[in-house]
Image (tube, rainbow, N blue to C red):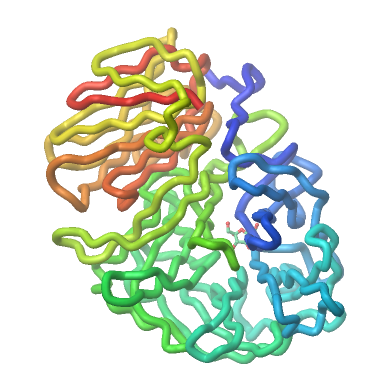
Amino acid sequence: MSTKGKRDFRPQFHFTPAANWMNDPNGMVYENGNYHLFYQHYPKGTTPGPMHWGHAISTDLLTWQHRPVAIAPDELGVIFSGSAVYDEHNTSGLGTDGQAPIVAMYTSHGECEQQSVAYSLDGIHFTKYEQNPVIKNPGITDFRDPKMFWNPVRGCWSLVLAAKDRVHFYASDNLLDWHKTGEFGPEGNLAPGIWECPDLFPLPTRDGEKWLLLVSMTTTPEQGQIIPQYFIGDFDGNTFINSQPFDEVARVDEGFDHYAGVTFQNAPERIFLAWASNWGYAAQLPTGDYCGQMSLAKSLKLVETPNDGLRLGGKPILPVDQSESETIPHHSFTGEQPLTSETFRLVLTADGPSEIVLKNQSGQMLTLGVNQQNEFYIDRSKAGADDFHPQFQMELYQRRSYPRFFNGSYQLDLIFDVSVVEAFIDQGTRSYTALIFPDTPYNTISVTGGSATITML
Ligand code: FRU
């Protein structure tokens, strides 16, 4: 029985559009104390339509202020995903004396896919560059999602974009004139598919740095529909060189609902945010007047694992960090206890198998934990409404389990926000983002195999 129209599933600290459709995060840039989040948006309906860039800003990555639509379709096409940079030294010449521009590049999706620029001097209103497109289509149908970044090897701007089943790299001195410098892919793919929304950036290691190439892949429903992959390697200034065995290619998140994640440009840390949904059923969610939500922002890092080399980890940016806060009410427990809020954080400490079960009065329940085989698992098969789309009811979209990268004791961090859960283990080297639609709020929580601390958010 679907809960459509029955209750408000809007999460409180996961970003949602004020109304209507949203998918990928776009153009994420930090400038003048503000995090700018643009996003794929159809402002006239709750299902995908002609895409625009919606816009919101935040100073803490948790509370967002909606801004008007930033970029709307034109004669070159609708506005697909892309990125933005703060052009501090006005290399583009699009700024004015004393006012550096934010320069955005998006995919004009029309008769073909090509890349176009728009810029802003106030961070709100955008002007399209007169000579768009800046990168023409080279005869490849899927040619999109440019992610610009500063190239420290060559001392210029670079970008990575998705070209069917691989990525292409381009370089530029002025963000407007671009030339191709290399390609990478599709070796190492976890399944056959089309690459989308790439990102490339360095993260520190014990003895230097490694470059991360993120690629979101769309594959078949039988393979999970969406796979957010990452590769670890080096960047020679022109192209990415993979340095981890291809059979160790891994996922940014193992959950059902995590896609198109990229990082903020110009931010003090490497902060990442993804769309918390799945193209398989994204347009049929029972959420009413809005459709689409983002993951929490998380700060990324590389983690050394005992047997699996370096792995991507991360720490979610939370409303409160109870380990640092004396004033936020929290308490420890084992066994079952009543749950009075639809927004909370639970930290479970354990050194063997454990289980967390959330239940409501109609017996719907969400289960997660670590099993006898040392696998981290999540089970939403009985968590709530699942009949809004047949794909949501397939086994692969109900249960997942992945071996931990560590043995022995662990901390499992569960962040619950009405209809979105995010669970992290072992410094975020494994994580699950999952949507759940319980008919009524879960009103009990039980923990076995460890001790938990819960904080109402
Ligand atoms: C990824 C994606 C992008 C594209 C956008 C269109 O989810 O398919 O490749 O630019 O969504 O909304």
Q: Position of residue 407 (x, y in %)?
A: 13, 47
Q: Position of residue 88 (x, y in %)?
A: 70, 76
Q: Is residue 3 above or below residue 121?
A: above
Is any part of residue 385 visible from this angle? no
Q: Residue at x 57, y 79 (%)?
A: 150
Foreground residue among 65 and 105 = 65
Q: Is residue 343 above or below residue 165?
A: above
Point out the quarter of the image occupied by ligand 1. bottom right
Q: Position of residue 71 (x, y in %)?
A: 80, 61
Return the residue found at the far top.
Answer: 361
Q: Position of residue 309 (x, y in %)?
A: 21, 66
Q: Residue at x 51, y 22 (%)?
A: 342
Q: Residue at x 18, y 25 (%)?
A: 449
Foreground residue among 33 and 337 = 33
Image side of residue 7 versus residue 427, left or right = right
Q: Residue at x 43, y 49 (%)?
A: 221
Image side of residue 259 versus residue 376, left or right = right
Image side of residue 2 versus residue 131, left or right = left
Q: Is residue 104 above or below residue 408?
A: below
